[in-house]
Amino acid sequence: MAVGWHRPTKLVIDTQAIQENVRNEVKRMPQGTELFAVVKANGYGHGAVQTAKAAIKGGATGFCVAIVDEAIELREAGITEPILILSIVDVSYIDLLLKYDLSVTVATQEWLEQAIDYLGHIETQEPLKVHIKVDTGMGRIGFITPEGAKQAVELVQTSQKFIWEGLFTHFSAADEKDASYFEKQNRRFQAVLAVLNELPKYVHVSNSAAALWHPESIGNMIRFGIGMYGLNPSGHELPEVYPLKPALSLVSRLIQVKELPPGEGIGYGHTYTTSENEWIGIVPIGYADGWLRHLQGFSVLVNGEKCEIIGRICMDQCMIRLPRKVNVGTQVTLIGNDHGENITMQMVADKLETIHYEVACMFSERLPREYK
Ligand SMILES: *Cc1c(COP(=O)(O)O)cnc(C)c1O
């Protein structure tokens, strides 16, 4: 996809903020704990490589991604720290895992057996680094019983084809005021630990929410995602433990400003009609950039003043109502700070009836990312 380098609309990513968020978390982690920065989905839309580099400066010692290609992107950018792929990778790609020195998640006994078969048929004798995943209540990937996990561990340790590098689980509710489900998952993971005679290098359970609100959780590594980008994992549910610094802003500039008389329709379907003489500004961003049509009625900032998005959002442009004549070229802040006013990713998420995680991931490739 073509990136809009020659259009005044861009995401601005504050790499200092990422670094600071990581450093603040590293400072409060229990002794001997490592922080792996989660940079899946292009670093939650922030840019995986730049985020990873900032995270290293803040004290991250490894990375988590969702898919093989994301791991390869980091390796090709020169990142040498451990990288864990959090999802299941088809055994036919094991050669890539070895070539790029990637650690992979093991969630079923069948996968292990297939992997042993595959590793027996390829030339490289290098062992594959694996993290065994336990499903303690997320209902997603992983072994369900302590016996299942133990059996997998035994196979990994007897086969010589693996390095047992990790054991982990994932919480589904570490961001809730009521900690009972979190505790239940915790107990189930404890039950797995109880049947094992030995532990791997990394035992890890915490996402950002668990790291922030349950800092004494089991393990010696945390998988820190959303908090690194400066967003409260719980949305509105729980207060931040320390101030998280949002890293992403979205800005543009007015490309035309016009005064329309009363009774004029704005946008497709003329869903907005001017009721008096109104100053209208055109902003070059639309749903093809991930600025979704449902944001009609939301506001953006011009000179620190909130201006409503009026009429339907088009594919490449949208219209806003200005309080008065404003010069063409004036900055428009869609997310971020402007003259002390602030539009947060949470506010966008609220308007879209979703979570900021999804907002961060919705910005399309057409938006250039500028790093500062
Ligand atoms: C995405 C993900 C994380 C990171 O979660 P955050 O809430 O962004 O910190 C951690 N662990 C797993 C397994 C994940 O899929």
Image (cartoon, rainbow, N blue to C red):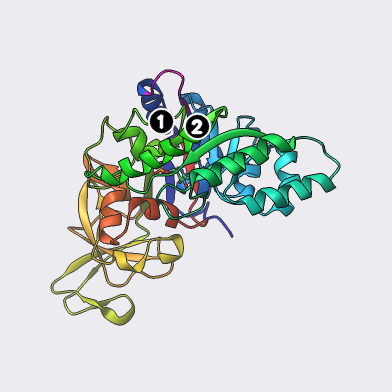
Between 180 and 8, the residue placed more toward the observer is 180
Query: Seen in the image, is 158 located left or right of residue 54?
Result: right
> Percent from the top left, x then y, of residue 16?
42, 30
SS at mark 2 in the image: strand
Provide the residue designation for mark 1. Answer: 218
Figure check: 280 above or below 168: below
Q: Which residues are magenta?
A: 29-34
Neighbours of disc 2 within 10 Å: few (<14), some (14-19), many (20+)? many
Residue extending furthest toward the right: 123
As shown in the figure, which amino acid type bears the numbered disc 2? Val
Cβ atoms at labels 1 and 2 below 8 Å apart: yes
Principal secondary structure, stretch drawn in magenta: loop
Residue at 31% across, 33% down: 214
Query: Seen in the image, is 133 located left or right of residue 177?
Result: right
Neighbours of disc 1 within 10 Å: few (<14), some (14-19), many (20+)? some
Residue extending furthest toward the top: 31
As measured in the structure, the alpha-carbon distance from the residue carrying label 1 to the one carrying label 2 is: 8 Å
Q: Give residue 297's quadrant in the image.
A: bottom left
> Does the magenta portion include 186?
no
